[in-house]
Image (tube, grey):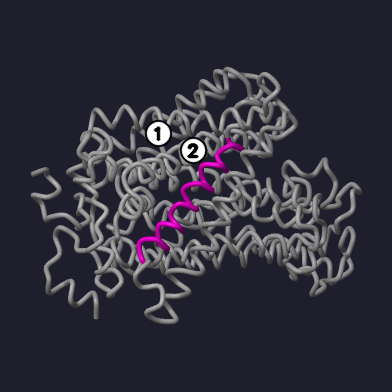
Amino acid sequence: MNDNQARGGIGRVGAKGLSVGKVGVLGGAVIGVSVVAPAYTLTSGLGPTVSAVGLQTPAIFLIGFIPMLMVLFGYRELNLAMPDSGTSFTWASRAFGPWIGWLSGWGLISATVLVLSNLAAVATDFFFILLAQLTGDDALARLPFENLPLNIAVTTVFVALAAYVGYRGVEATEKVQWGLVGFQLIALVWYSIAAISSALGGGAYDYTPVDASWFNPLAVGDLSLIVAGISLSIFMFWGWDTVITMNEEAKDPKRTPGRAATVTIVLIIALYLLVTVATLMWAGVGTGELGAGNPDNQESIFAVLAPHVMGPFAILMSIAILTSSLASLQSTMVSPARTLLAMGYYEALPKSFASISPRFKSPATATFWAAGSSIVFYVVMRLLSENALWDTITALGMMVCFYYGATGLAAVWYFRRSWFTSPRNFFMRFLLPLIGGATLVWMFFQTAIDSMDPDYGSGSSLNGVGLVFVLGIGVILLGVVLMVVMRFVTPAYFRGETIPVSEHEADRAAGGVHVLHDDETPEEAGSARG
């Protein structure tokens, strides 16, 4: 009998030694918002979107929001049935078996490791930009681009600091995030109010009155723009699922993560719409000097507009973007560490990944593996080519679509016996996660096809094939190779012994019975069902 069976029998999810009862709804939402990093995301994503779709940008955000919300319902249902820090890995394993489960975990880990390196690079860039603004020495802003060893050193320090805070446990993460997230939200709301007030007061660059058509997805019309909107959601909304990976540390493991994720995604879309409307009202969509559609303003739209909108307080926006990158860098560490922890616990990876810090009750080996991998990846790709680094970040969208989509479909299949037992189950366990999951899986294949074009991404190619495709599929194939190796190193998981696919378990889920934790008594289970 293996360890998992000895601990509590087939069908139970395991308590892995993490600290319990530490994260509430608000604390989880704060961490979720920090991973999405709205200040950083908007400054780099708003300009290109306006340039492509103009005044329909709010509608495009709404279109991108829809599949994420639908998949969220699947996450919530799975978490109610079996709260487990492995999330996509554990749930896909239970629904579809070890192979799809392992690849779902790999998709999450590889995507977050790629993002960690990107966030650290962005934090480094804005750190020197802020130094230049404070000192008045513009040469400082160019240092990370001109001095590669310095760039790598500072980026490594940022990743190491993020790993250290993550190692100290979820409480330390939450405390750090309250300040960092609070500051960027204040800066974004300040910018929005100032822009709207200026526009209404006649001080706008190109005043554009708000119209209801801005928010109507049906008014977009062009299918290619709708596809672009869904693709955009990957970048604009990705990261809210980090809240779910902290379920074992939540005050109510079955309900708190789902509620916190809902608060996160609703708050993000509301903030995106507010900032977008304010920008469109003040700057318009033209290509003039301060127009939101000016290609020269796309790289960092707030850096261009904030001085004119906020006056001397514009430096707050630079600080907000820096803190947004740092906050997301630190909180994003939560997700891969807990997925690696779960994969070690269920013997999909060597058991050393399941080690817990006795003092902080946090993933130990897993946290430092996630940090170390992101540093190695950044250094290698930065030495090869800056284009290769950014194309790999673009390629992460394929991994995100895969594991989000797989998780949504896992919810549909896992709860297949309860689809028609109630109207609620029909929508929450079948229709909504099916549409969301299928949409994202389709986006995975569509992105793969599109990225074969040499002009996709930075325009780099390898033997006539787009570099984004080569890198994206390459990362997935690397996962397949590692999975085959693990099949021989840790065979118990692949035999279905540590995470079995159980018809009996699906029957229990259909009847509203959640899967027991190893440390949960039947009496507690009865209370949870009530």
Task: Look at the picture and state if 157 lies above or below 76.
Answer: above
Amino acid type shown at disc 1: Ala
- State the separation of the CA atoms marked 1 and 2: 8 Å
What number is the disc on residue 116? 2
1 and 2 marks in contact (CB < 8 Å)? yes
Q: To which residue does mark 1 refer?
A: 371
Residue 519: where, in percent of width, then height?
14, 60
The residue stretch that appears in magenta? 393-415
Viewer-closest of 386 and 254:
254
* Left or right of 377 in this view: 210: right
Earlier-in-chain disc, 1 versus 2: 2
Magenta stretch holds residue 207? no
On-image quarter of the C terminus: bottom left
On-image quarter of the N terminus: top left
Please tell me whether mark 1 sits on a helix, a strand or a loop: helix
* Left or right of 175 in this view: 133: right
Which secondary structure class fits the magenta region best? Answer: helix
* Left or right of 249 in this view: 459: right
| Residue depicted at x 84% and y 67% | 199
* Left or right of 529 in this view: 230: right
